[in-house]
């Protein structure tokens, strides 16, 4: 049985050391129809592995390895005319960032030198780099000029992985370094100008760059204006990441029973699926690295990982905060608030984001789309975007709870929160968590006091539950002939015993009477009856069912339904 290649992005290693490989080689035909391409995807969608596959396929020095590396794959039976016909020059700019030890320019120069020297060594070329060169453009220019002088039979194919790693400065809240290196005269822009020049001279024949964010595209393409951005092109929508059919095929291969396959697929779909990268796409995409993370743990340990997302791979609440802080902070916050409340937002993707000139509603949405925090829900004159999955939903909730505490100068008592979650899961007691909700609202709801209603109560429960790894919380969960206000479900690896169905009701403090409370409770009981007609709810032996009525920020009735 093939090994699960979690964290491995080397195509040759995967193909020669018995690792699972999902065949993406059919896209080579599409890639080959254009010469200069840029393709953006969120982190960990298999971009590096795809480039590694392209590198092996076109490498003139690996022609004798073609059968070994590509046997059994689509492209082996359908090779293109250009297979194994290029000198592959690859640059990987991951890890380039400004540190105390190294400036952005020094890091970029180091990576350019590495790529150039690997190129020389791999093909045993009679080229010597200038060790004293201090400009990245000088290294690349010398390399390609010298290569041209060798008058070899094949041209150069340039691959660039993480072309936009400099945008990490933006995601850390610092745009100064980013703007310096990418504006006219900056060393990054000059680097791509050399590639363009060598393309026009015929030294470089093809170019493929991957990255995450379109915020660098304008600055890069101003000096390199011959590239085609295929990020939202329908033909490439499934090129990276996994489709549902591909996931099902993987599960059939590794899991013996159909019931287990269905159970695992449901978890994967809920947490890692949901991405639509083209308005014309018909299939949603899973994050491939997170799929490998989950399956690697599941198959090795016989159980799911406690954390649904490897924290080294996940977007964080801090990422949202830093993007919100760009340019128009208050307007950006309003967009995030809308996304959290309604689970969607309307806008138009920007072809590129020129942050030094403007940063509007659509630019902000585009950045959230680029990093995987939004995806296309419904195309139209104005596109509707949504949160792609439960994992990303929790990232927004973590951001909101942090922001709310900062604004109110209030901090949740972590020990009380942990204890409340333990009592919720182990003892079947929702009281301590509800007390925390009431306390949180009392201290933080001043900003929204005028429009405070049931949705803020619901959102507070969800925020307090978002940072734990024992529960998944859903609002407006479809059941029977209605929608449960809050459904608190155990995660696959949870140690909790109990799950919860909660029907929330809210009364304004000035309008609260015993009669109105009883009316709200009666209404909730009727709704509960409808939910419990759903087999998914009635078949859960450890499901606890509560009606909770708030008056202002305080609970005035909490009733457990024993059916």
Image (cartoon, rainbow, N blue to C red):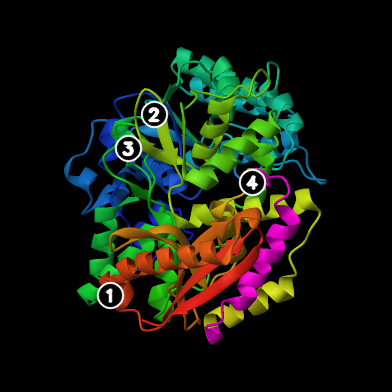
| Number of other residues with Cα within 10 Å of mark 4, as a class: few under 14, some 14 to 19, many 20 or more | many
Q: Which residue is mark 1?
A: 260
Q: Which residue is mark 3?
A: 84
Q: With respect to residue 404, does 31 lie above or below? A: above
| First in sequence: mark 4 vs mark 3 | 3
Q: With respect to residue 228, does 308 lie above or below? A: below
**Based on the displayed image, in which of its 4 quarters is residue 134 positioned?**
top right
Q: Position of residue 492 (x, y in %)?
A: 43, 74
Q: Which residue is mark 2?
A: 230
Please give the name of the residue rendered at 50% of the width and 63% of the height, measured from the top-left corner: 504
Q: CA distance from mark 4 to mark 2?
A: 25 Å
Q: Secondary structure at mark 4?
A: helix
Q: Is residue 255 visible?
A: no
Extent of the magenta region:
426-450
What secondary structure prevails in the magenta region?
helix
Q: CA distance from mark 2 to mark 3?
A: 24 Å
| Number of other residues with Cα within 10 Å of mark 1, as a class: few under 14, some 14 to 19, many 20 or more | few
**Left or right: residue 16 compared with residue 453:** left
Q: Secondary structure at mark 2?
A: loop
| Number of other residues with Cα within 10 Å of mark 3, as a class: few under 14, some 14 to 19, many 20 or more | many
Placement of the C terminus among the 4 image quadrants:
bottom left
């Amino acid at each position: 049985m093939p090994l699960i290649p979690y964290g491995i992005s080397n195509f040759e290693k995967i193909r020669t050391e018995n690792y699972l490989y999902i065949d993406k080689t059919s896209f080579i035909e599409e890639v080959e129809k254009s010469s200069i391409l840029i393709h953006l995807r969120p982190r960990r969608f298999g971009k590096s592995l795809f480039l590694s596959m392209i590198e092996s396929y076109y490498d003139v020095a690996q022609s004798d390895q073609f059968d070994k590396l590509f046997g059994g794959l689509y492209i082996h039976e359908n090779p293109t005319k250009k297979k194994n016909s290029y000198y592959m020059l690859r640059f990987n700019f991951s890890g380039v960032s400004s540190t105390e030890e190294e400036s952005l320019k020094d890091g970029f120069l180091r990576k350019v030198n590495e790529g150039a020297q690997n190129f020389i060594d791999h093909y045993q070329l009679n080229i010597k780099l200038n060790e004293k060169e201090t400009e990245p453009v000088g290294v690349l220019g010398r390399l390609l000029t010298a290569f041209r002088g060798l008058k070899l039979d094949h041209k150069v194919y340039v691959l660039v992985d993480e072309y936009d790693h400099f945008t990490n400065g933006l995601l850390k809240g610092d745009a100064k370094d980013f703007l310096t290196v990418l504006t006219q005269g900056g060393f990054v822009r000059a680097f791509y100008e050399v590639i363009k020049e060598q393309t026009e001279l015929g030294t470089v024949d093809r170019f493929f760059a991957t990255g995450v964010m379109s915020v660098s595209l304008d600055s890069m393409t101003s000096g390199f204006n011959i590239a085609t951005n295929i990020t939202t092109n329908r033909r490439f929508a499934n090129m990276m990441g996994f489709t549902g059919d591909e996931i099902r095929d993987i599960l059939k291969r590794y899991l013996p029973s159909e019931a287990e396959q269905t159970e695992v697929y449901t978890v994967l779909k809920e947490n890692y699926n949901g991405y639509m990268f083209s308005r014309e796409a018909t299939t949603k995409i899973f994050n491939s690295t997170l799929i490998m993370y989950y399956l690697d743990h599941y198959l090795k340990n016989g159980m799911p990982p406690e954390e649904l997302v490897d924290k080294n791979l996940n977007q964080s609440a801090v990422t949202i905060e830093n993007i919100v802080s760009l340019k128009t902070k208050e307007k950006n916050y309003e967009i995030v608030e809308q996304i959290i409340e309604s689970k969607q937002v309307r806008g138009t993707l920007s072809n590129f984001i020129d942050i030094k000139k403007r940063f509007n509603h659509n630019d902000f949405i585009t950045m959230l789309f680029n990093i995987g925090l939004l995806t296309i829900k419904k195309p139209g004159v104005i596109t509707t975007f949504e949160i792609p999955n439960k994992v990303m939903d929790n990232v927004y909730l973590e951001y909101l709870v942090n922001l709310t505490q900062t604004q109110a100068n209030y901090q949740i008592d972590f020990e009380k929160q942990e204890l409340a979650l333990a009592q919720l899961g182990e003892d079947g007691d929702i009281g301590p968590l509800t007390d925390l909700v009431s306390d949180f609202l009392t201290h933080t709801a001043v900003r929204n006091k005028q429009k405070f209603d049931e949705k803020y109560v619901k959102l507070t429960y969800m925020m307090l539950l978002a940072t734990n790894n024992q529960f998944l919380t859903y609002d407006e969960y479809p059941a029977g002939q209605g929608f449960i206000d809050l459904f608190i479900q155990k995660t696959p690896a949870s140690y909790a015993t109990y799950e919860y169905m909660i029907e929330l009701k809210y009364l304004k403090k000035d309008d609260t009477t015993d009669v109105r409370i009883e009316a709200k409770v009666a209404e909730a009981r009727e709704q509960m009856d409808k939910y419990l007609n759903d087999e998914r709810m009635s078949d859960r032996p450890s499901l606890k069912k509560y009606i909770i009525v708030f008056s202002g920020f305080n609970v005035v009735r909490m009733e457990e339904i024993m059916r």
